[in-house]
Amino acid sequence: MNEQKSPIDQMLNLALATAMNQYQFYLDISSKVETTKVKELLLSLARSEEALITKIESMMASGVVDAVERARTLEEDEPDDTPFDLVQAETDPRLYVCNRALKMTMKGYTFYLSIAARAKSEVISRMFRYFAHMKAEQIRQIRFICESL
């Protein structure tokens, strides 16, 4: 028997794949970085992405009610996607990594927001706004650490 997945399940699978790719990106790049602060940032982002993966898997198993309820009250400014000093980033591997992490996380943020905006279901829209909120938190973390380098 061919079991058809619901639109919410399909969207959760998409979110899960995105989060898993970003998790792997942070782990891969952290293994190549020598600067302690930058390595800690990347590992922290990987842990944050791992938490998102866990939340998505939990939603797949038990439903999306909590995320939908949290998204109802979320209102925030778009995170700052301005790259860190591009001139120095060419010679400073710390800034290069910070810019890569910022770019990757912004991609996730805008991806989740675009799905939220196009969603035909209010539930899916709120769910993806919640995921975007989590990415915005990661971007603030990147900015905080990288601006102190």
Image: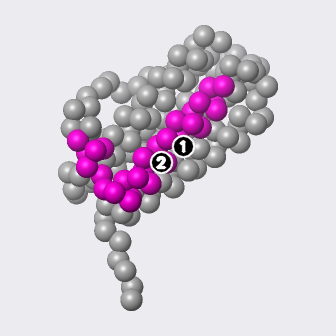
Residue pointed to by mark 1 = 50
Which region shows up in magenta? 40-69
**Looking at the image, which residue sits at the far top?**
148
Residue 126 visible (yes or no) = no
Residue 61 visible (yes or no) = yes
Q: Judge the density around disc 1: few (<14), some (14-19), many (≥20) Cα neighbours within 10 Å.
A: some
**Tag shown at residue 54:** 2
Q: Nearer the viewer, residue 142 or 45?
A: 45
Q: Which residue sits at x=51%, y=55%? A: 17
Residue 62 in percent (x, y) is at: 34, 57
Residue 32 in percent (x, y) is at: 78, 35
Vertical comparison of 22 with 75: above or below: below
Callout count: 2
> Which SS class for mark 1?
helix
The answer to which quarter of the image holds residue 83 is: top right
Q: Quadrant of the C terminus?
A: top right
Q: Which residue sits at x=70%, y=27%? A: 39
